Amino acid sequence: MSMKGILGKKIGMTRIFDESGDTISATLIEAGPCVVVQIKTDEKDGYSAVQLGYAEQKEERLTKPVLGHFKRANVKPHRILKEFRDMEGEYKEGDEIRSDIFSPGERVNVAGLSKGRGFAGVVKRHGFRGGPKTHGQSNRHRAPGSIGQSSYPKRVFKGLKMAGRMGHKRTTIRNLEVVKVLPDRNLILLKGGVPGARNSIVEIIG
């Protein structure tokens, strides 16, 4: 199954109005332009993929092997490199991919790093109800409660929902509708929210 993809930067959220005048929350993404840095094939690499580069950067900050990787494709160095499997179309190294590969009405998946929330308790992290507010309880309002048994199995099971670091994980939101595409400004407007904070890097996969 062929697909298409592009890298972009989350600009922020806004709202638009549909034909009936109802408001719709939408996310604005600066998608591309991306450049094809490498073409991977089944014969040479064991799988087929297109490696895209996004966000140009200065050469003096890179090592010679990394610079050679870009010079082999005759493209400028880019800060972000991502591979997209089974991309449709005939691409060659040096080709530019812009936001107009998508059109309004299409459905896409958007992947990125979710916002990091730091160390969080079970109420915020997992939605626990917390302890009772009365009946002699003084400091158990947001506690997890019992995490195991004493006599058997005498341990805490792996994977138990507990307090810990929250967020900053790769998250994918599926089946988002492309509302509008502005190729001259490299912008894509998607219905709904996407993972990550403002200015974070996202992958749009169609």
Image (tube, rainbow, N blue to C red):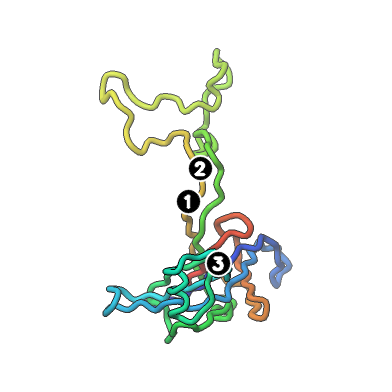
Q: Are marks 1 and 3 in contact (CB under 8 Å)?
A: no
Q: Are marks 3 and 2 in contact (CB under 8 Å)?
A: no
Left or right relative to 135: residue 160? left
Residue identified by numbered label 3: 60
**Quadrant location, the N terminus:** bottom left
Residue shown at the point (33%, 29%) measured from the top left: 156
Q: Residue furthest bottom?
A: 90
Left or right relative to 187: residue 1? left
Q: Residues within 10 Å of mark 3 (few under 14, many from 20)?
A: few
Q: Is residue 22 above or below residue 93?
A: above
At numbered mark 2, what does the secondary structure look like: helix, strand or loop? strand
Residue 54's tag is none
Q: Residues within 10 Å of mark 2 (few under 14, many from 20)?
A: some
From the image, state whether disc 1 or disc 3 is nearer to you.
3
Identified by mark 3, the residue type is Glu
Residue identified by numbered label 1: 169
Residue identified by numbered label 2: 166
- How far apart marks 3 and 2 lie (CA) works out to 36 Å
Disc nearer the start of the sequence (1/3): 3
At numbered mark 1, what does the secondary structure look like: helix, strand or loop? loop
Query: Along the line of sight, which residue is nearer the eye, 80 or 171?
Result: 80
